[in-house]
Image: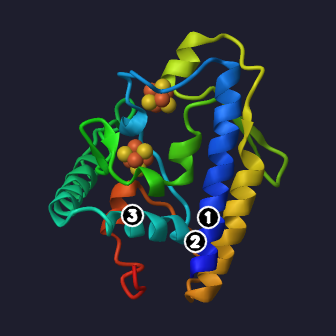
Amino acid sequence: MNKILDSLEKLYEDVENEFSTIGKNYDFNCSGCVTNCCTTLFYHYTFVEEYMLRFGLSKVDSDIQSSIIENSKRYIFKKENFSGKGKFKMMCPANKDGLCIIYKYRPMICRIHGVPSKLAFPNGRVDFYKGCEVMASKFFEFPYFLDRTRFFQNLSLIEQKFRKEFGKPLGYKFKKTIAQMILSKDLDNLDV
Ligand code: SF4
Ligand code: SF4
């Protein structure tokens, strides 16, 4: 397991370095931002990130853990009862007073979201993202962008290793919010 988590940590580090390089081109950083993007609805696609997240959660005080679990229940309830009009927005259950409680263990998309980026799919499709609301509102052109492709390819390889080692079906379509990952029972049999 350690080897797998080390690979994921290394990947996260690479993503953060690239994020920082791209961000510098726009003189971009998050300090003082009042548009907290942790209210954005993100989905995550890997067991290994769920494991990392829960590992991070296990390191915080039990009263904070309990409040994150309660937040997660509220999040799921509100999302299930969302009218569907406009975009669903609600503060991530792992955020307290504007700060991520499991920052060191947060998933890939939380590390990439702010700067412009692109993602190339195996079928030739290429998606382009302008970055967070703040970034998108400040610029008209985005000549510098982070290429998500190799990072997600690498994440997929790490996920395959994780699934093989822990008997999770390779074909299983994982798609969860942070709240769902926090409340999930899928990894309860692993020593998180
Ligand atoms: S995991 Fe952390 S960084 Fe990601 S949305 Fe939640 S609070 Fe924000
Ligand atoms: S990524 Fe953008 S929206 Fe999120 S905290 Fe940073 S500047 Fe604000």
The quadrant the N terminus occupies is: bottom right
**Residue at screen point 85% across, 47% down:** 124
Image vertical order of residue 24 relative to residue 183, above or below: above
In depth, the one of 58 and 72 nearer the eye is: 58
Image vertical order of residue 145 relative to residue 69, above or below: above
Point out the residue furthest to the right here. Answer: 124
173 left or right of 177?
right
22 left or right of 31?
right
Q: Residue beneath label 3, please?
A: 56
Cβ–Cβ below 8 Å for labels 2 and 1? yes
Quadrant of res 53: bottom left
- The amino acid type, in three-letter code, at marker 2 is Leu
- SS at badge 3: helix
Label 3 near ligand 1 (CB < 8 Å): no
Q: Residue beneath label 1, please?
A: 8
- The amino acid type, in three-letter code, at marker 1 is Leu
Residue 170 can be seen, yes or no: no
